Amino acid sequence: MINFYTTPIESISLHRVGNKNKNEGIFLSDSPFALNDETTGLLKEYFFKPFREKEENYYKFTNEVDVEFNELYKIVSEIFNDPGSAHINSKKIATHLFEQSNHPHIKSGEVYVVHFTDVLLDNVKVDAVGIFKSELKHDFLQFQEKGKNLDIVIQQGININKLDKGCLILNSH
């Protein structure tokens, strides 16, 4: 059983990954996202809510020869071994996802690579790396004063109540 109650976000990196097959590009942020109390609370709920609502499914990294040859396993292991490398390795993760994005139905979107500590897995604290992707944009209304009237401005953004895609990689053996 997973418990996220006391889990802090140690670092978060944001990137945009397009569909390589559609000639969409990749945008890699130069530095990690600077968290504050408001964004931390909203993002934790955005990332963890789907994992609380669904049955837990666990998988292990594999490779035909040895797990050490699994590209994602190698990158995430670097983050677990050296948390200061999280942002550099988040770029490798985003690039790896971009290189795999060849199917015409894969949508472009923002990729969040998040390093968590103190995830309780069966009452044992472990580190985790979350890889999340938001793809679907929704219209929403904003209002602004224009003279003595209120004006409606239509904008697009993501729904923070529904994560599009995500996985948690737990540092457990």
Image (cartoon, helix red, strand yellow):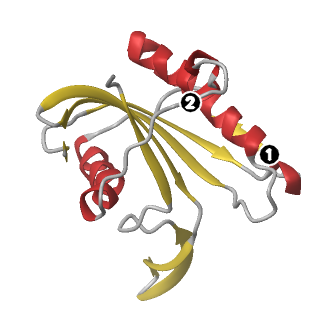
Disc number placed over residue 25 in the picture, else none: 1
Q: Residue furthest bottom?
A: 149
- Can see residue 91? no
Query: x, y (%) of residue 91?
Result: 62, 28
Report which quarter residue 126 is drawn in: top left
Secondary structure category for the residue under label 1: loop
Q: Is residue 27 left or right of 22 when viewed as pictured? A: left
Q: Earlier in the sequence, mark 2 or mark 1?
A: 1
Instruction: Residue under label 2, please give it.
Output: 62
Determine whether label 2 and label 1 are within 8 Å by CB: no
Mark sitting on residue 58: none
| Most foreground residue, 61 or 157 | 61
Specify the amino acid type for callout 1: Gly
Name the foreground residue: 111 vs 140.
111
Name the amino acid, label 2: Thr
Classify 9 as above or below 140.
above
Dot 1, how many residues are within 10 Å of its Cα: few (below 14), some (14-19), or many (20+)? few
Residue 26 lies left or right of residue 156; in this view the side is: right
Residue at 87% over, 57% down: 22
Image quadrant in which you'd find residue 5: top left
Side of 119 where 130 appears, left or right: right
**Residue visible at 28% across and 44% down in the picture:** 40
Q: Position of residue 127 (x, y in %)?
A: 30, 26
**How far, Cα to Cα, is label 2 from label 1?**
29 Å
40 or 154, nearer to the observer: 40
